[in-house]
Image: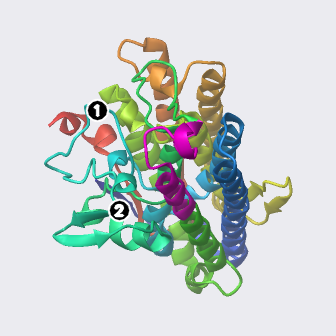
Amino acid sequence: MMIRTMTAACALAAFSTPLMAGKADVLNTYADIAQAGYEDSVTTAQRLSDAIDALLEKPSAQTLTRAREAWIAARVPYQQTEVFRFGNAIVDDWEGKVNAWPLDEGLIDYVADDAGPTDENPYAVLNVIAQPTFTLSGQEIDATAITPELLETTLHEADQVEANVATGYHAVEFLLWGQDLNGTDHGAGDRPWTDYATGDECTNGNCDRRGEYLRAATDLLLSDLEWMAAQWGAEGEARSTLTADEDAGLVAMLTGMGSLSYGEQAGERMKLGVMLNDPEEEHDCFSDNTHNSHFYDGLGIRNVYTGHYTRVDGSIVSGESLSDLVAEADADVDAGLRTQLDATMARLAAIKSTAEAGTSYDQMLARGNDAGEALIMSAVDALVNQTRGIERAVTALGLDGVGIEGSDSLDDPDAVFQ
């Protein structure tokens, strides 16, 4: 992964007057939006938890559908918080527990017959749900009770293999939808509700343990989100670290915006999938919710720049913003970046509306689907373009040390196939 480092070429003449009087207010707005976004993630995760309680108490097609709907709703605020990654170490150190992907789902539960262990991951089909005891890294593991502690301390990234994702949104997603075996054809995972049934109705075995795993993963997700929301509160570590050094705080904001825009979203999440024509590169691959994930990631970037976030209850969190600071330094740079952010959102909205009209994101990735590729690459180009605007904002503000993450798919495409 390449890091593109931005430094100001020189001090601007305009800096001879006090320019950044509003830095502290900008940082507080940013922290307020982070706190609200994570609190909304807690709220929607609690609704997901309630829906999963209903599913496990009375398994049916209806309760499974409601749990899936609650999962999709829970992604809306969370994806808007991904912009707080990359620049805030406390978020980066934590994020892998809640949103790591892709995952070798056979670690958790049954998978298609053609799956098996690989040289990279001998635990790719461990199927913990079917194994009350197993050997992991030479140790005998008692998994008779499937608990949050088992998932977090024993299974997650077992043997230091990143694909051994045992926790977070995507583990829950897999347990609600199952594998998506449609390739680049239309259709998401189609796990039957009877995978959570009791007695003779139970399908694919171990329905009680599958429910235990789903309950444990959901409880852990909720507690992790509650912890992060607290870190952005008035006395939280994330807020205090951000505001301790105003220039460093602004660097964190712009690093998060640029890295999510460029290397992460445009590169790893979007262009790479087009290059490989691979639906496994979808961010929400089991549920076919990737179009929403991309849209709300983009919205999160715009939220931070404009200092404006709409909460799940419809209320608004807003205040002095990066846009205000940049406009004071160079009004043209600010206007240009705002236009670029709006252009990106329009192109992500086009992907979202196309998927909602019946052409799923994995179909867009299919080899030979020129229209689908054009739709995705239009958004990739817009994300790259807005990153150039972010770089210009960095220069306008005279900041040093903004490191924007890269991606081989953008910076060295030949390396993708080596």
Magenta segment: does it hold 375?
Answer: no
Residue located beneath label 1 in the image: 113
User: Which residues are the magenta region?
Assistant: 193-217
| 76 left or right of 1 in image | right
| Vertical relation: 327 (above or below) 290 | below
Q: Position of residue 275 (x, y in %)?
A: 32, 28
Q: Position of residue 117 (x, y in %)?
A: 20, 46
Nearer-N-terminus badge (1/2): 1
Which of labels 1 and 2 is toward the front?
2
Instruction: Describe the element under mark 1 as helix, strand or loop.
Output: loop
Nearest the viewer among 332 and 110 is 110
The residue drawn where x is 38% and y is 43% is 268
Characterize the magenta stretch by its predominant secondary structure.
helix
Amino acid type at circle 1 is Asp
Q: Residue furthest front?
A: 200
Nearest the viewer among 327 and 35 is 35
Residue located beneath label 2 in the image: 132
Amino acid type at circle 2 is Pro
Report how far apart the C-alphas of labels 1 and 2 lie in the structure.
Answer: 21 Å
| 30 left or right of 277 in image | right
